[in-house]
Image: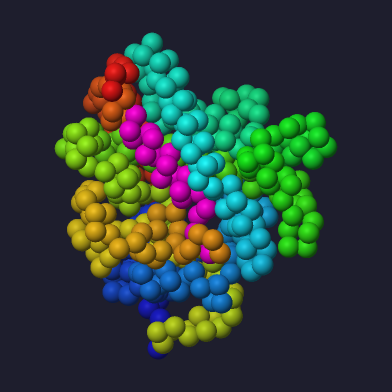
Amino acid sequence: MSMPKEEGLDHSLAFLKEGYEFILHRRKSFQSNVFETTLLGKKAICLGGKEGAALFYDPDKFIRGGAAPNRLVKTLFGEGGVQTLDGEQHRNRKAMFMSIMTKTHLQQLDKLLESEWEKTSEQWEKIDQLTLYEESQKILMKVACDWAGVPLDDANKRTEQMRCLFESPAAVGPAHWKGRTSRSKAEDWIAGLVEQVRNGNLHATKEGALRVFSEHRDSDGKLLPVRVVAVEVLNILRPIVAISIYIAFAALALHQFPGERERLKKGDGSIRRFVQEVRRFYPFFPATMAKVKQDFEWEGYQFKEGTLTLLDLYGNNHDPHLWEQPDLFRPDRFLDWKESPFDFIPQGGGDFDMGHRCAGEWVTIQVMEVSVDFLVNRLQYNVSEQDYSYSHSSMPSMPKSQMILSDVQKTSN
């Protein structure tokens, strides 16, 4: 059976123009959860739907090595990171990440975050207004470094570097090259700390990523290369700072859906359900990529070895076959949600332990819950008229005003 195919020489510009909705638009027009297109001059298959996601995360069908474009590797991921590995290498590296996701260590993250919100909000009382997206990045960078056992030498400089890593992959021109420069400088910084840990000149916390990753051994019993450790430590710091995007969207939701704020204040609504709906409703990652491991057939369609394949993350979270009225913001949809690793996939799907599902998803949820609790129950503030719109073609997307808050005051609650 012939796979639905988009006509034309190349659709890379259309992908940049349509952004998060590129795959979803074509799934609707083809009335199919699988179709073929051309990106960066190469054939690409796009998948969607619950079954498509389950297929995409089958390690016998797809591999990650060589799938990510160079511009993502040089900015967002780093070379040799866990996102680009397969097989035993991936299992070993994923186990390294999961080893720091213990209940006790995650509780420590909560305590660090609550303390930093308290200290920072006291400073906010002294200024007329602030940009939440920028300010939350500073909070998250300090917390991420404390949690990872990374000494933070220059908070403003390092926060800016982290921001550039996740803002630059889809950018063009100077903004993209700034991301590459930030990647190089950030890796230099962390690599120097790894060497200090290994030679005994830096006694990093036992449970933190810096020490755990510096001492981790691969499946051959060898220490990871210093530069690879640096990449993986940044794969802890960068995603935590990137949660600032979700925090900005959470503040937008609290403003645009005031009934939800009142429910959370009264305890009638669950912060967890609200957080999950923010993650479902607003754009974060548009898609994730892999390559066909070897020729196979699925539902009558032929998948050829080496073919680039994209899974529609944003589209699955807005798929009317998976979600009732997906374009409405309704946290209570998670009241009776039957959790599946293949329908709700804002940060990727599959299983945590052995698959490619983001190891930091639990961290994202915890950080958002603490942050939303502060915005609802621990702070009072005004939201003046501003540009609340966000673009589906800007990747990453966020409210254009980045959520400006004024007259911030701590409450006694």
Q: Residue 346 sits in which quadrant? A: bottom left
Q: Is residue 13 shown above or below 176?
A: below
Magenta-tinted stretch: 355-374
Q: Main secondary structure of the magenta part?
A: helix
User: Is residue 393 toward the left or the right of residue 185 in the image?
Assistant: left
**Residue at point 59%, 65% (across, down):** 64
Q: Nearer the viewer, residue 27 or 102?
A: 102
**Residue at point 78%, 52% (across, down):** 223
Q: Residue 378 sits in which quadrant? A: top left
Residue projecting furthest to the right: 199
Q: Is residue 31 shown above or below 346?
A: below
**Residue at point 28%, 70% (across, down):** 29
User: Is residue 49 toward the left or the right of residue 231 in the image?
Assistant: left
**Could you tell me if residue 44 is visible in this image?**
no
Q: Which of 35 and 382 is in front in this view?
A: 382
Could you say where residue 347 lies in the image, as x and y percent from the top left?
44, 54
Could you say where residue 254 lies in the image, as x and y percent from the top left?
25, 35
Q: Residue 262 sits in which quadrant? A: top left
**Residue at point 45%, 58% (across, down):** 348
Could you say where residue 122 lies in the image, as x and y percent from the top left?
40, 16
